[in-house]
Image: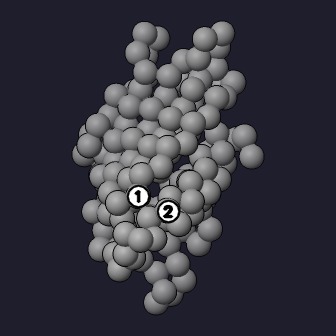
Amino acid sequence: MSLFRLERAVAAAPEEVWRRLTDWPAHGRQVPLTRTRVLTPGPNRTGTRFTARTGIGGLSFDDPMEVTRWEPPTADRAGACRLEKSGRVVRGWALIEVAGAPGGGSRVVWTEELSVRGVPRVFDPALVRAGSFLFGRALDGLLGTR
């Protein structure tokens, strides 16, 4: 499994940052050749399921995910959302944390552990670099900082 961590500081309030980062269809708009479909009725909560489909035609794969932790930020507590990935191609988890920053704004920490079927562990460093780049661009797009 490949583990990476992304951190961002943004001017927006934690509640707004949380809203942007848990807008699952918006994630698909940030990753090339990807669309995201929510499978459970809203609102978001523990148990929400969605699938990101990436690729073109027969060269596509599904990345099904389920929210296993849902704790929106409050005035006195950071928010945390954990996703479990259970696909045939991509497996692992992601943890999205949003906290108020001293002086205003928010601090975001996105931690993800991935494994890709058929990719030997020797390629974990390359997977970390690719994941950090791809998810970093998506994070920046969701936050409006790109």
Q: Amino acid at mark 2?
A: Pro
In this view, which residue lies farthest toward the right?
A: 146
User: What residue is pinned by disc 1?
Assistant: 2
90 over 78 or under it: above or below: below
Q: Which residue is mark 2?
A: 125
Which image quarter is the N terminus in? bottom left
Q: Earlier in the sequence, mark 2 or mark 1?
A: 1
**Residue 41 shows in this picture:** no
Image check: 61 left or right of 105? left
Q: Residue at x 66, y 45 (%)?
A: 140
Label 2 SS: helix
Other-residue count near label 1 (Cα within 10 Å), few / some / many at <14 / 14–19 / ≥20: some
Under circle 1, the secondary element is strand
Q: Is residue 92 above or below residue 76?
A: below
- Give the residue displayed 74% in from the left and 46% down from the top: 146
Residue 64, horizontal then vertical, whole percent = 34, 63
Crowding at mark 2 (Cα within 10 Å: few <14, some 14-19, many 20+)? some
Q: Are marks 2 and 1 in contact (CB under 8 Å)?
A: yes
- The image quadrant that residue 8 belongs to is top right
